Image (cartoon, grey):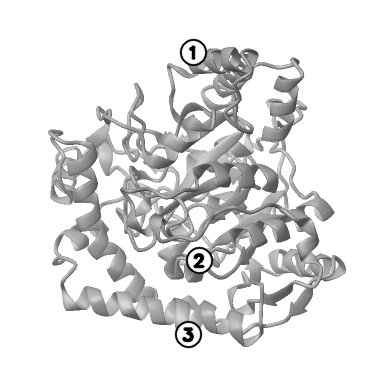
Amino acid sequence: MLAPCMQRRHLLLSSAAALALPSLSHAAPRTEGTAAAQAQAMAAGRLTAERLVQDYLSRIAALDKAGPRLNSVIELNPEARAIALALDAERRAGKLRGPLHGIPVLLKDNIATGDRMHTTAGSLALADLRVARDAHLVQRLRAAGAVILGKTNLSEWANMRSTRSVSGWSGRGGLTRNPYALDRSCSGSSSGTGAAIAADLATLGVGTETDGSIVSPASICGLVGLKPTLGRISRDGVIPIAHSQDTAGPMTRTVADAALLYAAMCGPDAADAVTQAAPDAAGQLDAGLIKGARLGVARNYFTGFDEADAAIELAIAKLRELGAEIVDNADLPAATAYGDAETLVLLYELKEDLGQWLKTFAPGHRVQSLADVIAFNAAHRSQEMPWFGQELFEKAQALGDLSTPAYREALAACAKGAREEGLDKALKAQRLDALIAPTGGLAWLIDPVASDHYGASFSTPAAVAGYPHLTVPAGFVRGLPLGLSFVGPAWSEWKLLSLGLAFEQATKHRRAPAFAKRTVPL
């Protein structure tokens, strides 16, 4: 659930991004599917859920397992076709579960499914684990008629194992590659979801985030990504890092699809008390909300790469043209003020929360605690630690429980830095509807020796505050996607989605990847 930029967010983008991106023949012309268009085709009898599932399975075989070999899907659901056939029968009988009826969805492999698939967080320690029941969000998706097509690869353990990790790599799943440039990272930790949805291997994708793991890969893979307010979507069944920041969210090719998937996953859950205290999640998209919206530019979070920042300046000009009131240089402090406190909170909560998840969803399994995972990795070093270690796990294991004063002090420092002196102050001082900035830098070269090389990130303030964060495609720099972020106060998802919709409709920046083989000449 951690984007790599959360750990070392100030490194500069590799200059190799300046090279042209050649394309491969695998990028055959194709109209990317949207949930609304597919639902309309099914309603008209031009398409069935079973045919749609078969189409995506064929595409996964051609692009993920062969061809450019994205390696984004870690496991396919052996029941997907049967589920689709049953949903087609329901449609013929006049029973529709909702707008997702028959629509294929890919889930990140840290989300529990009580079926024939495994739930592993990409770790060989859990490679044989089948859990007894679905996560709450999966229950909701099935009830809404979605077809769970499979699970996606991720940065192992949601990128909380090492400060020198390689995004998109897991011991179980191997390395996921960016469909826009195969020698570049798709960020993480929702790497497989980002790559798969960008390559149109399913209609919809679900990622998870603790800090940046939805919005960073969405931005780098040319997608819409929404990290909701903490408590909007139940955390039940999601392999955790930290209950104070973890959430699932949609990763899609359009804002409208993100809204549909978000609405389907929202809802109170007795197993997650914070969701029961959340206000009503009902809402709707309204691109007209852009007119008169006050948007503050968070210049502290620009990338420092002139071409990327120039693309964001064009985006700001477009928002102004659409009727938004731009408040330049909104006073949002850099996240470095509370970065150490955030790391400490995550380490403390990891030890406690992971142990609880294992006892709940993996009773009787050989791995029942963080200590067990550490021991497994040490015993299987050649498979689990060929590129990087587990020093973050070891630091977490050495800490005390959640009653420790150091933990309580760090948690308070996070709330003060990200909320009171951060987003709350910036939003209220200028009466802002949202803050805007580049989501982060461009995709960096994959480097298993020196690990990830990434630039700036705007993920941390919303992640630590628990507030919503939307990224939408803002264009391309030297052939690589760049995202524009909208961050608002708690429970403002529908407003952010509406602002993003207006920008998306006016710019139409999204374009399908061409599977460039490399960006550095031999």
Residue projecting furthest to the bottom: 429
Mark 2 highlights which residue?
467
Q: Which mark is residue 280?
A: none
Measuring 43% from the left and 53% from the top, which residue is drawn there? Answer: 247
Real-space Cα separation, disc 3 to disc 1, in angstroms? 52 Å
Q: Observer-nearest residue: 314 or 401?
A: 401
Crowd class of label 2 (few under 14; some 14 to 19; many from 20; radius 10 Å): many
What is the quadrant of the C terminus in the image? top right
Residue at 35%, 71% (x, y): give it: 342
Question: Taking 257 as reference, is 280 left or right?
Answer: left
Quadrant of the rendered image containing residue 377: top left
Q: Which residue is at 76% across, 29% downward?
A: 31
- Left or right of 306? Residue 250 is left
Residue 82 in view in this figure = yes
Could you tell me the amino acid type at mark 3? Glu
x and y, in percent, of residue 428 in the image: 60, 83
| Disc on res. 82 | 1
Q: Left or right: where does residue 47 sit relative to residue 118? A: right
For mark 2, give the secondary structure: loop
Q: Amino acid at mark 1?
A: Ala
> Which residue, given by chain and number where applicable, does mark 3 sit on?
421
| Among the two numbered marks 1 and 2 on one chain, the one whose residue lies closer to the N terminus | 1
Task: Give the alpha-carbon distance from disc 2 to disc 3, as whole Å.
Answer: 14 Å
Determine the secondary structure under disc 1.
helix
**Viewer-closest of 493 and 126:** 493
Query: Mark 2 or mark 3: which comes first in sequence?
Result: 3
Q: Is residue 230 above or below residue 364?
A: below
Q: Position of residue 194 (x, y in %)?
A: 55, 43
Q: Could you say which is closer to the camera, residue 457 or residue 101?
A: 101
Question: What distance separates the C-alpha of mark 1 from that of mark 2?
Answer: 38 Å
Q: Residues within 10 Å of mark 3 (few under 14, many from 20)?
A: some
